[in-house]
Amino acid sequence: MKALAGKVALVTGAGAGMGRAHALRLAADGARLFVTDVDEHGAGATVDMIRDAGGTATALGHDVSSEADWLDVLRFVDEACGYLDILVNNAGVVIYESLEAVAEQAWDRVFSINANGVFLGCRHGVSLLRKAKAGVIVNIGSSLFHYAIPTVASYVASKGAIAMLTKAAAYEYAPYGIRVNAVHPGIVATPMTESPLEDPDFVAAVVRTVPLRRVAEPSEIASVVAFLVSDRASFVTGADLVVDAGAFAGRGQGHG
Ligand SMILES: NC(=O)c1ccc[n+]([C@@H]2O[C@H](COP(=O)([O-])OP(=O)(O)OC[C@H]3O[C@@H](n4cnc5c(N)ncnc54)[C@H](O)[C@@H]3O)[C@@H](O)[C@H]2O)c1
């Protein structure tokens, strides 16, 4: 039997990039997917890919920074299935602006999606997750949650918030049997990184800091998410799982 047979899963920001990879992987493992994204067209394309592969999925328009959208989406899942086993808070954005240059409005936008979006998912998702046998949340942070690089202050700060929010939720939801973990990827080839990864100098500089000497494919992060949401990770909660090909391991030794 497939590892996630009979499970109901919701992945945010699943209309492209890593979110799509998570949705495809969880569906391949047997879960029934709710694929949500502010880009409804992208979400629909992901659903088509899942159905073509023999899976079951529904696309929903969803801005994770909107509490009203969260309530609508979760109501839809409740009416369709009555419970939720797996919530992957994946949606995120980045802006490349220094601390001195970033406007407050831009800072707020990054936080409203990256940090508040995860907060709203954890807060409102819990009622449906409690109806499942062993609910599980995975929050997608970034390896930039514990070291900074220039020009992405709003991004690294929002990812730091995700790391601590994950621990708080793990603590509070443990009595319900709900596990909550964070996955912190290093650099992954997705639409988010497409433009910087077109610059060979950028790629060379990044790869120098990565012991495995390459960027990740989205499926390599999705397989870690698939592990965390499965029963094989039944004793794992409150964890920060850094998936960065060793990049952080070299920090402090002059390599990054
Ligand atoms: N690509 C990387 O190198 C990398 C590294 C570490 C962490 N991450 C994180 O992984 C997650 C996915 O990143 P990605 O690289 O696939 O990004 P991406 O830009 O390729 O895809 C992000 C998806 O999120 C959607 N989205 C944006 N704002 C939204 C909103 N308000 N509500 C709902 N959906 C929204 C977009 O429409 C898009 O489909 C993000 O949280 C990102 O911060 C990415």
Image (spheres, rainbow, N blue to C red):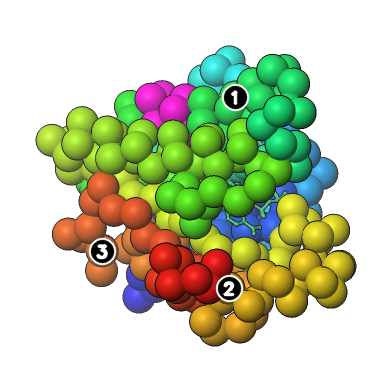
Q: Residues within 10 Å of mark 1 (few under 14, many from 20)?
A: many
Q: Is mark 1 within 8 Å of ligand 1?
A: yes
Q: Position of residue 146 (x, y in %)?
A: 43, 50
Nearer-N-terminus badge (1/2): 1
From the image, give the main secondary structure of the stretch colored magenta.
helix
Q: Nearer the viewer, residue 62 or 172?
A: 172
Residue at image position (58%, 27%) is 111
Q: Is residue 67 above or below residue 10?
A: above
- Tell me, for residue 112, which label it has, or none: 1
Residue 124 shows up from this direction? yes
- Tell me, for residue 233, which label it has, or none: 3
Residue furthest to the front: 254
The N terminus - image quarter: bottom left
- Tell me, for residue 209, which label it has, or none: 2
Residue furthest to the bottom: 212
Q: Which residues are magenta?
A: 118-124
